[in-house]
Amino acid sequence: MITAGKGRLVALAAVAVGATVALAGCASGDPLDSGSETAASGETLVVGSQDYYSNEIIAELYAQALEANGFTVQRDFRIGQREVYIPDIESGAIDVFPEYTGNLLQYYVPDTKATTADDVYAELETSLPDGLRVLDQSSATDQDSYNVTKEFSEQNGVTSLEDLAKVTTPLTLGGNSELATRPYGPDGLKSVYGVDVAFTPIEDSGGPLTIKALEDGDVQIVNIFSANPAIATSDLVTLDDPKGLFLASNVVPVVSKKVDDKAAEVINTVSAALTAEELVALNAKSVDDQESAEQIASDWLAEQKLF
C-alpha cells in the first residue's frame, strides 16, 4: 500500500517466527545456507529504504535474507527521497540501501554520458564516496518513465518523448516535487527533445493521486516508475525514450564497510533472483492486495528457496 508519510520509521528487526524458520530450513545444501555455523560479524546492520513502497519491499527482502543467515538487522524504512537519505548513507548510519543505478549515478555525476546498464554500473562503481560501494546490480529495473493516457496518445499520435514536440496544446508534467530539478525533468525534456512543459508537483511517487490527475486532464504527462503495476491496470502508454533522457536504472544495493563478504553474498543472491517481471508482481501485491512489505518479502523468499 502506498503511504504518503515522510517521517522516519525505525523498527527493530523482527521477522515472523514461521517465516524465519521456513527460510532457515530451506535448501540446506545451498552454498549460502551455513546453518548454525553462520559466522555473522556480530555487528548490527542497518537496512534503509526510500519513502516508496517498492523500495521498502526490496529492503525487506535484503533484511529478511540477512536475518535468515544469522545477521542482526535494524530497519530504518520510509526515510524519504534521495536528497534526504544520502547523507545518512554517507555518514555510515545506514549499511544497506536498495538504490537504482542510473538515478544514483546522476546524483553524483549529473553530466554523465553513460546510458546503458553496463556503462552506468561501471561508472557508478568509481563514483561513490569513500566507504561506500555497490554490490551486484539486479536485472530488475524500476526506472523513471513518462506516461500518458491511451486517449491522449491516440488523439495526438504520441508514442515517444520525441512525438511530444508536435503537440500544439499546452503540456503539464506531474510528479514528485524533486522532479522539477532532476536532469530528466522539465529542463531535460527541453534540452533533449525540445519540449516545453509546465510542472505540477504531485507527492505520491506515481500513486493514485498522480493517476487521477492524469485521467482528469489536470496534467498530460506523469512520471511513474516502470515497475508500477498501475501502468498496466490504468491502461497508460509509456513513452519511448529514443535519445536516452532516462539512464538505465537497475536495482543495486549500496553498502557500507560493515557489510562483509558473507553479507554481500547473501544480498547478491537476492538481487540475482529478482527480475523486472517479479518486481512488478511484488509491487502489485502491495498496491492491489494491500499486503505488507514484510509479508510480501517473506512469501517471495520462501517461494524462491534461496537460503
Image (cartoon, rainbow, N blue to C red):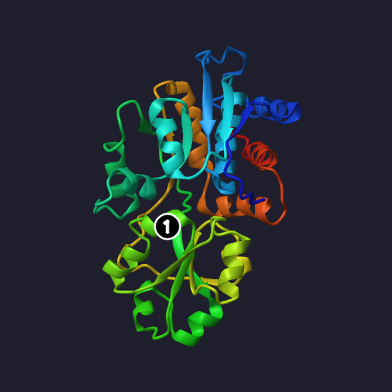
Q: Say which residue appears at 71% left-offset and 31% top-offset.
A: 19
125 over 244 or under it: above or below: above
Query: Percent from the top left, x then y, of residue 219?
Result: 51, 72
Which residue is rendered at x = 30% and y = 32% of the image? 129
- Amino acid type at image mark 1: Leu
Among all residues in the image, which is located at the extreme right? 18
- Position of residue 167 in the picture relative to residue 232 (left or right): left
Q: Is residue 268 visible?
A: no
Q: Is residue 128 above or below residue 165?
A: above
Residue 229 falls in which quadrant of the image? bottom right
Query: x, y percentage for residue 61?
Result: 58, 37
SS state under label 1: helix
Q: Answer left or right for 30 relative to 196.
A: right
- The vertical placement of 270 against 33, above or below, is below
Horizontal side of 22 relative to 170 (left or right) equals right
Q: Nearer the viewer, residue 25 or 299?
A: 299
Residue 141 percent coordinates (x, y): 46, 52
- Going 55% across and 41% down the picture, which residue do you hit? 58
Q: Which residue is mark 1?
A: 179
Horizontal side, residue 21 vs residue 213: left or right: right
In the image, what residue occupies the spot 56% across and 77% down? 217
